[in-house]
Structure formats: C-alpha cells, structure tokens
Amino acid sequence: MKIDKLVGDRFKERPSDCVVDSHALMIRGGYMKNVANGIYSSYMPLRRITRKIEQIIREEMDAIDGQEVQFPVVMPASLWQESGRYDSIGSEMLRFNDRTGAPMVLGMTHEEAAVHLVREYANTYNKYPFMIYQIQTKFRDEARPRAGLIRVREFTMKDAYSFHTSQEDLERYYERCHKAYERIFARCGVPEVISVKSDSGMMGGSVSHEFMLLTPIGEDSIAMCGECGYSANMEAAESIVENIRDDVSEPLTSVSTPECRSIEDVCAFLGSKSEKACKAVVYQKNEDDSYIVLFIRGDLEANETKLTNFLGFGIHPAEIKENCGICAGFIGPVGLEDVFVLFDSSLKNANNLICGANKEGYHYKGLDMLRDLNDIEYHDFAKIASGGICPVCGKKTITVSRGIEVGNIFQLGTKYTEAMRMQYLDSEGVSHYPIMGCYGIGVGRLAASVCEAHHDEYGPIWPKAIAPWQVHLCAIRSDDAEVREFADRLYADLCEAGVEVIYDDRKVSAGVMFSDADLLGVPLRVIVSPRNMKNGCCEFVSRDKVFSEQVALTDVFRRIKDLI
Amino acid sequence: MKIDKLVGDRFKERPSDCVVDSHALMIRGGYMKNVANGIYSSYMPLRRITRKIEQIIREEMDAIDGQEVQFPVVMPASLWQESGRYDSIGSEMLRFNDRTGAPMVLGMTHEEAAVHLVREYANTYNKYPFMIYQIQTKFRDEARPRAGLIRVREFTMKDAYSFHTSQEDLERYYERCHKAYERIFARCGVPEVISVKSDSGMMGGSVSHEFMLLTPIGEDSIAMCGECGYSANMEAAESIVENIRDDVSEPLTSVSTPECRSIEDVCAFLGSKSEKACKAVVYQKNEDDSYIVLFIRGDLEANETKLTNFLGFGIHPAEIKENCGICAGFIGPVGLEDVFVLFDSSLKNANNLICGANKEGYHYKGLDMLRDLNDIEYHDFAKIASGGICPVCGKKTITVSRGIEVGNIFQLGTKYTEAMRMQYLDSEGVSHYPIMGCYGIGVGRLAASVCEAHHDEYGPIWPKAIAPWQVHLCAIRSDDAEVREFADRLYADLCEAGVEVIYDDRKVSAGVMFSDADLLGVPLRVIVSPRNMKNGCCEFVSRDKVFSEQVALTDVFRRIKDLI
C-alpha cells in the first residue's frame, strides 16, 4: 500500500471532544470517523487491525472446539419474549416494527438466538458438550456513548455459547475458555489484562468474570488485594469492615439538629465521626415507586447492584415527596414504620451511633443496634473501598483501581434453556435443561484498549500481531534517483514476499513522514534517504524507539524478514 | 471436526415450504435455520462456505486496489436525507427512532456512508482514484422474501465504492472491476455467470451490469441474442418490433362490443389479431393518484421500469373509479382528454387497429396512428419478448431466460457527490464533483447460487474453493479395531497437516454416513471399512461421483494431499 493513496486524514491537533488518548489518536491517525453518537465508520488501518484481532479470536475459539456460526442482527421480539428479556431489558435494546408491523429488536447479545439455533438439535445427552460462536455486529442503544471505541452503540463482538449436561462440565469448559481468553489477550499484545470476579447483571447466572485492562481512564472499578491476589469488580466485591462496639452503650437521646440534613452536617454539628453514624439511603422500586430505605454505616456508600440482586427487582434513587411518611434528612431506624427497610452488615452490633429521629429537625444519639432494634437481618450492600478488608485473606489490603472491560465470561446455568424450553434426554430417558455458559469479547474495544496500553504522545504503538502493516518504508527525497530506485525495488520485493508494507514515497519532509508513521504505529520503520544511501545503508527504527540500527543495503531485505 | 459433534440436524424429507433446491438442501443439510421471515441463522458448514467466499472476494478487491473499510449497519436518517433517498426509497428501508428519538435507518446499501467517509479527505485531484469496500450485514425489508438465501431480508454483502475525476477513469476502473467479478465467480465455482446490461433503478447513474447465473428458478428475466451475444436484463432491454403498416387504411368506425373489456375479448369478438390492437394500460402516480395511460401494441406487455425511468416518478397499476373521466375497458387514444398519455414505439405508423372508443360498450376499428392522431411522441415502454428483434444485430433472435443476480456494478456518476456536496479541486484550483462507481455482491445469495448450479438430488456438490471441508473421512464399522486405528491415525495426520477434514466415526450404517456426506457436499470422500482394510486400501470417491479409486493404505495420505 502506498500512503499517498491511503484514504483518511492524519493531523496533529487533538480533537477537543476526545477525552481519552486512544480516541484522540484513532481520530488523528485516520483510523475512524464519527457517523452518529457512538457510531463510527472504520478506515483501512483500523479494519486491518480488527480483522487481525478477529482472526486471533477465531483461532483460539476453534482451538477450544468452538463452531463458528452466524446469528441475525435483526431478530423477532418473540425470541426475547420467550426468555423474558424483552420486558426486563431497558431502552438500551433497540425495538422497532418491520413493514408488516411485527415487533423486532436489534441484537445486543445472542443467548436467545443461540438457544433457538440448537434447541431441536441438542435433544440427547450424547450431543453435549458443544460451543458455538460468532463474530458480528451488535447494537446497544447506550445513553452515554463515550471515549471513542471504548463505549459505542454499534460494535463488533465475538460472542460464544456453550451447552453442558452438568455443572462440573460447564466449569471445566469455563476454565478452558478462561485460558483461551488469556491467550487471546496475550497474542493481541496486552498480557497484562487480568480477570476479576464480576456481577452477572442482566445476563443471569451465578459465577462470572470480567477481563480488565487496568488504566485510569477505565469505566469500571476493580477491588484488588495486593497481598493474596484477590480481585473483583466493585459491583461484585464483598465489603467487609471491622464492626467495633464500644464497651459502654450510651442511652438513646433525641437531640435538636436544625438544618442538618446530610450525615456530614450532623456529624460536624455533633462532633462525631461518620463511622459512628447510621446513614439512611432511600430508593424507589421501579415498578410502583414504593420506598426502600437502606441503613448503612456513615462512611460507606451503597452498592446498587448488590441491592438489586438481593431484591430481585429494579430500583432508582428516591425522590421523597411530602406526606409520604418519610422525613427526608432525618430518617432513622427507630420508630420508622410502614416502609421496606434493609440493613448493611457494617452496622451489625454497633452502638453509640447517630441516626435520624424521623422528626423534622431531630436526630438520636446513642443508638445501639442490639438494644434498640429487634429482629434485624444484615446483608452486604456496601461498596468496597480502598483500605477495606480483603474477603479472601482478611487483611486490610484492598485497593480500588480503574479498568476497561475487554471481555467477559458467564456461567449462565439454565436461565435461558428453562425459559425457552430447551431440553435433552439423559441416558435413562429423563428430560433435563442443559446448562449454558457465554463468553464475549468486544473487538473494537479491545483495539482501543491495546492503543491505551501501548502509545506515546505521537501515536499508537501497535504490537506486531495486530499492527495494520509490519513495515513502514519511508523514502526520504524520493526525487533522488538512487533513493527512488532502491526504495521502489525494496517495496516490490517486500510485496512479492508477502510482507505487509506501507510505502511513503511522497514529496514531503522527513518530519511529515515520521509523524504520519508515528500515527500509523507500524512496528518497524525502514528509512531510505540520500544520506543513508551515501553510507551504503538503511536506517531501521522500531515504533517504540527502543531499537534502531543501520543495516547495509545488501542486508536490508533479509534483515526485515528476520525482524518481523 | 468430528461429525458427531457438528451442531445441526440433517434429514431426508424435503421441507414443504422450500420451492427451490438450494433452499431445501441447505435446510436438509443443517446449513441454516429460519429465525423470522427472510432471516436465517447459519450453522458451521454454511459459515465456513461464506467465509471462504468472503476471502475470495476480499483478495480480488484488494487486487484492484480496494481498501477494506467498515461502515455502520445503523445510520442516522440525516445521511439519507442529504442524498434524497430517505424519501425516495419505500418501505424496504427500515426506519426507526433511537432512544433519544433521533430518526435512524438500517443500511441496505452504503453510497451515503461512503461519501460521508471520504468527502473531507478527497478534496484534491491527486487523491484520486480510489476504491473502498466492506463486507457486512445489510437489511432490506423485502415484502416477499423467498427461496431461502436467494431473497432474504438480512444478508451479508460486499459493497464497494470507487471515486474518480473523469468518466474515462471511471470506465477504466469499471472494466477492471468487471474482470475482478469474473474471477470471483470463476473461483467460487460458477464461471458460467454472465454479465448483462441492466437498469440502475434506485441507485441512480447510467451504465450498469448485473452478473447472472442462468437458472429456471431465477427471479430475473434476461434477454439474450444467440446470434451476436447481446444480453440485458428485461428491465433494461430495448424492445424493437417490426412496425407493419397495411397498404390501405380503413375508415375509423365505431362498433358495439358489449362486455368486451379486455383486448383478448375484443380481438376474439371482432376476429382480429392482438398485433392489430392498440391496448391501453393504466397507471397512477404514487404521489397524487393522477392517471397515466400507456398505449401499446396488443401483443406486448408494458415494462414498468422503463415507464418509471421516463416519468421520473413512482407509479402503480391503476384502480379506475367511476366518473374519473376514464372509461375502463373501452379506453382509446381518439378523443381521450385531460389524461396524461404515452405511446409505445410498437404503435408507430400502424394502421387498421382496434382501440377503445372511450364509451361504455364501444370500440373503434380502423385506427390509423398517422391519420387519426396528432403530435404523437413514441418511446420504448414495452417488455422485450422471445422472438423479438436484437437491438444490436437486428435479427429476430431474442430469447428470454431466467437468472439469479449474484452481483452488480453501477456507474453512478455524480448523483451522490452532488447531493452530498463532495467536491475536489483540480490542478487549476477549480471545484468539481467526483464521479462514482459502486459494486455489490451478495455473499449468501452467491452460496445459494453455487448450490443451485452444482447439486444433485442428494445434496450440494461444493466446488473445492468454497467447500466447508476438503475431505470427508468415513470410518465404516469404527468398532473394528483395524478400521478405528487406521482412520484415527489418518484423521490426526490430516489435521496435523492442516487439511480441512470432517470425520465420521459414528456407529451408524454406511447408508446414513453417505447420505450425510452427500448433504455436506465435501469434494473428496475417503472410506475406511473392514472390507477395504482387508484389501489393503481405502476407497476415494468424489462428491459428484465422477471419480472413484482404490488407494493403497500406504499411499492414502500422499494421495489426499495430491488431490486437494
């Protein structure tokens, strides 16, 4: 490929709407162009990168006995009604009617389509286990697309679905897939991707893992223990705190706390620490707006995912109306009636707490959870925080980092096969629901993540395995007859040998050539110039600038072949 | 791949809803499953076939300097409003609103997206020519999906777009692409695909060609001349007939023709031939339902595409209401007022014709187009018919055949670049609109067409280049130790050597094995059986049964490598 015909503009200025580097560099480098909010077209360099990623994924999926199939992008709503997700998934699922008025959806994931494809076929135990996968376009109508390819509405995804006759078999396969994922990320140049336990969310099922590239620009928070290696998504990480009980319980006393509506205000007013407060966080049930009050230790935050999983229905932060029976700003557990109440484990056994008195302008001091309240169940509803206790090794070693989720794997159980009535007969002729796993990787997001992990201020530094080309050949002063002849010959020889080479023979300055080469991020740069020709050599430089050497003209071709 | 784990059912009975063989065989062979009207999921064998077709297309597009890109499936309506097609395309374009209420469409073709991607980049003449292409999912909300993969709603298509600074340059590239298409179809095993001139339809532009696989089950009609090789789609083929004028013109006479409402009735009633009738065909303008009357020779049919192209607006067959000024069944050109009237060339100079008298129950005899009508313009609005005159060599040699359109190429001109204001500066600094070409191939339809062209009653006969596997290894009586050992070893050796092999070691009869093998259509079948083992050989049979041989056990591996 000659660069002067490569479609796409490259430029120096960082676009003002780019908040992360991969987004800025992929726009500046002519990798993609925005078509609509969260929707992009890809130019050739990005398409070459995503095709290489797809091929690596395909090879690794085939290596664990995956069968490549293809599901439709457009699906009838009826499939999603069967599973129940047509109603349970919100507006991120795009719904429409076709010309006959039939309700349809755009695929955002394909559990339903996978069950549909195999439910007649897989009717006896001896057809198990098997795994099917596809690499295809998906659409998720995100409310807030951001960060270039990190969070988009339309994306290419590899999604795989495995079917099993026992939990043990699923677990064995889950582990194989986990290892395949590690190989995929390593081959794509990001072996530093880690797997963390996660919440299954709308996918259902129990055990699941996310594969995370740790980076400050990530959207997810991950709790990790530096001591024992434990890691989990914040959504899923168990929060454990020391529950300290003072030796002496003070009496429960009502105090006037005018204008103190937040826990910070009250603690400041009464000269207490937030750890000694019982904070109320109020939600409403999505279905009927009824109130749910969570009591939690004053220094902790509520984890909505844990709440939703516990409750089994959707909730949202409350808007408290007058005369609703709840006294906003002064809510406490003592004497609170006719409201659904939950308690976080952080309050267990605690005493000498401040809490609301359910009366405008008043709080209690001296709340003793054991003495003043009856029949309380405590559960884990808190967000884990840095300095928290590791749920595995028990040390106060938790740190919270940010990361990009580049893949995920789920043990789904029988959620979909039961709902969609997929059954098989075992060797005794007894019917069962097969057990499923599902496994996803976002191709474009992985490309962007590799760029986040490997770039400098001048452009991406693509790992060999996914670089759009292997060699970037620069002919500086291509109007020089010697340069022209040597570079043209080398280009022809490399093409002939099947080497992926991009050739810059434009009449532009070395500066322009090099900044374009930096933006394209090709691993090996080979520079032909009048000065080099005079010295009988070419200059080789790696994109990361770590490696550079002079190679004799007669050795250039062989040396390139060695290096790539 | 072992066949006992290949997901998908194979069976003998032809499904009752399959009207074409490729559809029936691809359902019977476990290639695909219907998800909704005109929407399918693909199992592994079909996905392997389409991937190979995609790779052949990709290689040939790269060979003519194509740059692979990717456009979105979901696009903002605004792009299509720019080109004007948001309004001009009917309900086959799927429209919907996203969660913010923004109007969006599902891509059915990507001219707009192509112009959007390059219009800032390609702003000077020296960036031309270039071609970009993608291979991606498209959705066309067909009213009548049919024939399996021949006419679907969701499909994978390769669509390419070239940009030029002169018509000559476009024509040169168009010719290169034409040759690339010939190579693609030949490599996919259907060198018999022919190119025919076609109508450009909703794509705009002037010259276009369709690539047709001739088959009785095709949806398109193609006019061909056995003499000079002329060929064209019926939509586009010029209709030429002999315009015979009798020596003596009879007088125009009104005759009573009660109950004669069709041209056949009138001709039978008056004892005349349909060639001597002036038939009226009535349409209505889509926009306001106003009437358009076409007069055409009684033995010919109207070609709606020619009419639409001439008129420049959409029409539909008329529903004639009472008191509309048109006397249904008795319409004629004499005395017909206040209606938009067109005349087909077949009537030019004709005389002694029968026609309606615009009066209930009456026709005229003796109509002379020259004598009785003034200022008539004649145009070609007729469908070409078998036995018609070849527009190139002038002989009465036209035959009409049916075919499947597997690809098309269009010279688009500046329709899209003008509408979307894409311009470049020439070497003098003057602005111009670039000239475009576009080039499509439907991947699934091509797979189905190859199956139509190459199958027998037992299954598809896939050409090597696109077959899902190269070798189908049958171990008959795999419980026989010798058979098991040899077949397992051979399978392992072939896998090791990278040969695509599907291995059937099930405990089923030879009959079941062979009918499954026929349905999978793999080119070379290698049969290991106790009898063969006793004879120290394996049996090789080609899928088309043309070739068969006994190969000594020691030669089997080498011979397979030779054959594939």
Image (cartoon, coloured by chain):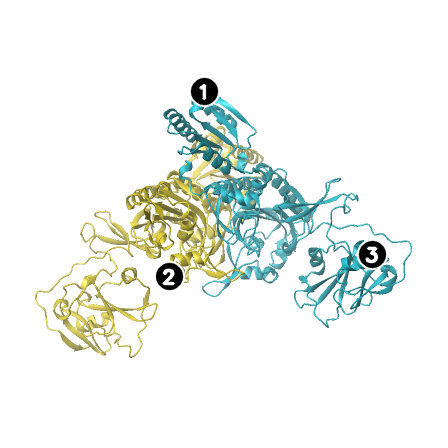
Chain colours: A cyan, B yellow
On the image, the x and y values in percent for residue A68 come to 53, 45
| Discs 1 and 2 carry the same chain letter | no
Q: Is residue A445 above or below residue B141?
A: above
Numbered label attached to residue B181: none
Query: Label 2 is placed on what type of residue?
Result: Ser
Give the number of the mark in front: 1 or 2: 1
Chain hosting mark 1:
A
Q: Which residue is mark 2?
A: B88
Residue bearing the label numbered 1 = A535
Residue A282 vs residue A349, the one in the foreground: A282
Q: Can residue B507 be seen in the rendering of this structure?
A: no
The chain ID associated with circle 2 is B
Q: Position of residue A146 (x, y in %)?
A: 56, 51
Q: Is residue B59 left or right of residue A215?
A: left
Check the residue under mark 3 and report the chain it is in: A
Residue B19 in the image: x percent, y percent?
40, 57
